[in-house]
Image (cartoon, rainbow, N blue to C red):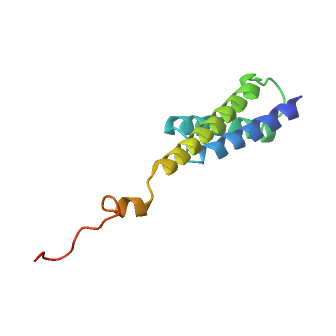
Amino acid sequence: MFNVYVLFLILSGAAMLGMSGIRRGQVTARRIWNAVLGAAFLLYGFYLLLFFQNGHYVVFYYVFILPILMGIRFFRDRAAYRARQQRTAAQTPSPSYAQQGGYGQQAPRGPVL
């Protein structure tokens, strides 16, 4: 059980750090939380793996829930960001439409005699 807990700590910490590294489509505060919690999970997992000999260790149960919730939120934010990007791309008029001068007629150039 101990090795599974340590493995899950390290994997979830690395996943949360990976999610914090993607800038587009996320709120900055959520990226910071992903980075801080991911680093904490990763460091605690490496501490238990490398330096912990025997004795008492604390099992945080939110380690099993928090990365899943953060991952769900990450993918929802990414989907909303992509939908916003597609919506703004669909609303932008084409360049040929913007250059037409009313009913397809061009204004006269030069002096009128």
Q: In which quarter of the image is the N terminus?
A: top right
Given residues 50 and 83, the one toward you in this image is 83
Q: Which residue lies furthest to the right in this view?
A: 1
Who's the residue at 21% across and 74% down the image? 109
Given residues 12 and 50, the one toward you in this image is 12
Q: Quadrant of the C terminus?
A: bottom left
Q: Which residue lies furthest to the left in this view?
A: 113
Q: Residue 28: image x %, image y %? A: 50, 39
Is 36 situated left or right of 3 in this image?
left
Is 36 situated left or right of 64 in this image?
left
Given residues 67 and 84, the one toward you in this image is 84
Res. 24 in view: no
Q: Residue 110: image x %, image y %? A: 17, 77
Who's the residue at 61% across and 37% down the image? 34
Res. 36 in view: yes
Q: Residue 65: image x %, image y %? A: 73, 26
Q: Which residue lies furthest to the front in this view?
A: 113
Who's the residue at 47% across and 48% down the image? 91
Q: Residue 46: image x %, image y %? A: 75, 41
Is 110 situated left or right of 54 in this image?
left
Tag count in the figure? 0
